[in-house]
Image (spheres, rainbow, N blue to C red):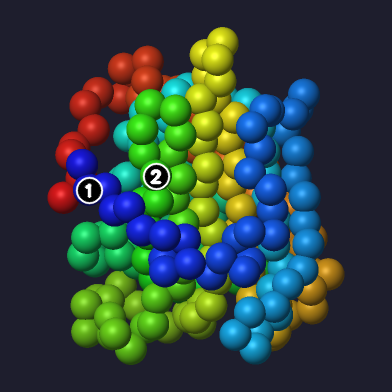
Amino acid sequence: MLLMMIPVSLACESALLSRFQTPTEPPAEQTIRTTTGSAGGANYVGAQVTFRSPSSPRDWQRVLEHPELQDEWHPKELGTERVERIQGTDFYQRTGISVLGTFTIRRQVIPRIRWLEMNDDVLRTCWYAGNIEEFREKVKAWDDGSPWQERGYGGWTVRALAGGGSVVAYQVWVNADMVPSSFVSWAVTRTLPKLVGAFDARVAELAGGAAGKVPAAP
């Protein structure tokens, strides 16, 4: 397993990620919170989904360390079109979100994932959007001409519960300089709960052995 223990301040934009508190207990039902913030001269909309999962942090690790497999199981209506591993924990991803069934907004991004903490009690990761120029040659076969998401942050926190299962929180920060913040907030609150629900179902599926063995991360 590839495990990188890196301080948050060195790995991702802590000024944004620290805006949401890390939950220690799950809410009665899935909850989503939104806020706004700025970093590096850019404006962002942030959203965090928190919920209870029947799976352990180790179960979640099996899915989260393999984002390049997302497009094989991820519900297509949630927008994931293609995910490819570039190198180590750097990935190419293309999404296409349908807006009111009339047109699709596509974005390409290179998430650079960092493992911050991993043991039987807690899993923490973060990601930030990589510089496309650094990877231009490596992704040209997948680049379909869609706009590149050059700024963005996010991350997972999965904390074990004493009675079994875990409390899970996922947050994402979307650059809102080109689109009104109100629209970005509407979009993330519409898609994010379904997105993390799909992850939860996938983790439970693998934990139950229904999908067979998952390959080891490089």
Under circle 2, the secondary element is strand
The quarter of the picture where residue 209 lies is: top left
Q: Is residue 68 visible?
A: no
Residue at image position (53%, 77%) is 151
1 horizontally vs 110: left or right: left
Q: Which mark is residue 117?
A: 2
Q: Is residue 85 above or below residue 58?
A: below
Q: Is residue 167 above or below residue 36?
A: above
Q: Report, in whole angstroms, how far the alpha carbon at label 2 lies from the one at label 1.
A: 12 Å
Q: Position of residue 1 (x, y in %)?
A: 20, 42
Q: Residue furthest right?
A: 182
215 horizontally vs 26: left or right: left
Residue at image position (45%, 72%) is 129
Earlier-in-chain disc, 2 versus 1: 1
- Mark 2 touches mark 1? (CB < 8 Å): no
- Check disc 2: other Cα within 10 Å, few if <14, some if 14-19, many if 20+: some
Q: Is residue 42 above or below residue 27?
A: below
Q: Residue furthest top?
A: 163
User: Mark 2 or 1, which is nearer the eye?
Assistant: 2
Q: Which mark is residue 2?
A: 1
Q: Which mark is residue 95?
A: none
Amino acid on which disc 1 is placed: Leu
Residue at image position (72%, 68%) is 45
Instruction: Identify which residue, 209 or 50, lies in the foreground.
Output: 50
Instruction: Identify which residue, 133 or 16, lies in the foreground.
Output: 16
Q: Position of residue 142 (x, y in %)?
A: 30, 72
Amino acid on which disc 2 is placed: Glu
